[in-house]
Image (tube, rainbow, N blue to C red):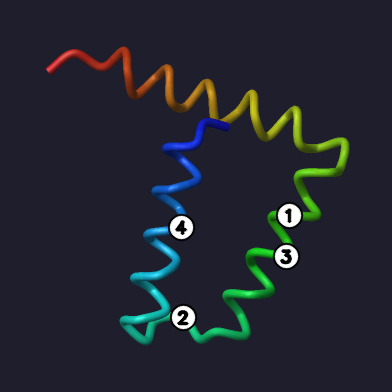
């Protein structure tokens, strides 16, 4: 996953916390879940899925 996606997700997380939509406790749980999920065998499948979504969005012609 590229740094720009990580940065975008971090910004979204901060906005959700500051807007009151997400409290600090669940945010920490979400971050830890993502951290531990990245070390599992599913990480490669998730990466391929996200890459295919990004390629599909990139190929859309307006």
Compute the Cα span from label 1 to label 2: 18 Å
Compute the Cα span from label 4 to label 2: 13 Å
As displayed, is residue 32 above or below residue 25?
above
The local secondary structure at tag 2 comes to: loop
Residue that carries the numbered disc 2 in the rendered image: 22
Residue 24 x, y percent position in the rendering: 55, 84
As displayed, is residue 14 above or below residue 20?
above
- The residue sitting at 38% across, 61% down in the picture is 12
Residue that carries the numbered disc 1 in the rendered image: 35
Of 25 and 62, nearer the camera is 25
Residues at marks 2 and 3 touching, judged by CB atoms closer than 8 Å? no
Residue 36 x, y percent position in the rendering: 80, 55
The residue lying furthest to the right in this view is 41
Q: Nearer the viewer, mark 4 or mark 2?
A: 4
In the rendered structure, find residue 32 and report the number of the disc placed on it. Answer: 3
The disc, 4 or 3, on the residue closer to the chain's N-terminal end is 4
Q: Nearer the viewer, mark 1 or mark 2?
A: 1
Residue 26 x, y percent position in the rendering: 61, 80
């Amino acid at each position: 996953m590229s740094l720009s996606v990580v940065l975008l997700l971090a910004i979204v997380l901060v906005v959700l916390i500051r807007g009151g939509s997400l409290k600090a406790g669940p945010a920490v749980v979400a971050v830890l879940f993502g951290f531990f999920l990245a070390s599992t065998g599913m990480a490669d499948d998730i990466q391929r899925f996200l890459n295919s979504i990004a390629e599909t969005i990139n190929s859309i012609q307006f």
